[in-house]
Image (tube, rainbow, N blue to C red):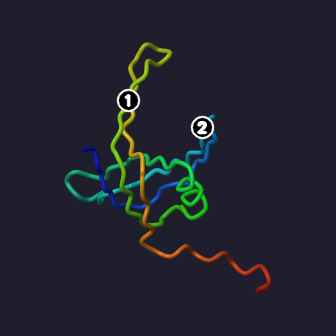
């Protein structure tokens, strides 16, 4: 069984793409602490379908999440002949651990 659960903070804006079969949203997750001996782990998390829509709307930089899914690996040959590698999580569940920051009220004047 291939199951992974990882907790971290979203880094950068979600990236949403439409495919022939569905829609995918990818977020970059930073897990761990930079000061720890092992450093920080950076991993992409792909969400598909309905979960991709939720992730795209609610996934903001700095939000803490728990992502559960399966760990996948992809390799490819680059134009320079080098082999590229990508480890990523295909999420089946995303849990947001903090509230979505509210948008500034446009009716408020300073």
| Viewer-side label of 1, 2 | 2
Instruction: Looking at the picture, tell me which residue is in the foreground, 43 or 91.
Output: 91
Q: Position of residue 104 (x, y in %)?
A: 69, 78
- Locate residue 30, reporting x and y percent: 38, 55
Q: Are marks 1 and 2 in contact (CB under 8 Å)?
A: no
How many numbered discs, if any? 2
Query: Whole-percent x and y of residue 36?
Result: 23, 58
> Which one is earlier in the sequence, the residue at label 1 or at label 2?
2
Q: Residues within 10 Å of mark 1 (few under 14, many from 20)?
A: few
Eyeballing the image, is 97 above or below 10?
A: below
Vertical placement of 74 versus 11: above or below? Answer: above
* Residue farthest along the top direction in this orientation: 81
Q: Residue at horizontal 24%, vertical 44%?
A: 1
- Which residue, given by chain and number where applicable, does mark 2 sit on? 21
Q: In the rendering, which numbered label is found on residue 73?
A: none
Distance of label 1 from label 2 (alpha carbons): 24 Å
Question: Toward which corner of the image does residue 76 lie, by quadrant?
Answer: top left
Q: Residue at x 52, y 48 (%)?
A: 48
Q: Helix or strand or loop: what does disc 1 sit on?
A: strand
Query: Disc 1 marks which residue?
Result: 85
Q: Residue at x 29, y 60 (%)?
A: 33
Between 31 and 110, the residue placed more toward the observer is 31
Dot 2, crowdedness within 10 Å: few (<14), some or many (≥20)?
Answer: few
Left or right: residue 59 versus residue 71 is right
Closer-to-camera residue (38/70): 70
Callout 2 secondary element? loop
Q: Quadrant of the C terminus?
A: bottom right
């Amino acid at each position: 069984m291939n199951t992974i659960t990882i907790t971290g903070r979203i880094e950068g804006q979600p990236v949403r793409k439409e495919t022939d079969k569905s829609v995918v949203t990818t977020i970059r997750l930073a897990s761990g602490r930079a000061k720890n001996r092992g450093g920080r782990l950076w991993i992409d998390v792909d969400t598909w379908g309905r979960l991709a829509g939720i992730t795209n709307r609610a996934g903001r930089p700095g939000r803490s999440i728990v992502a559960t899914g399966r760990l996948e690996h992809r390799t490819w040959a680059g134009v320079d002949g080098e082999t590229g590698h990508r480890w990523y999580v295909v999420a089946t569940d995303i849990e947001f651990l903090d509230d979505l920051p509210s948008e500034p009220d446009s009716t408020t004047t300073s």
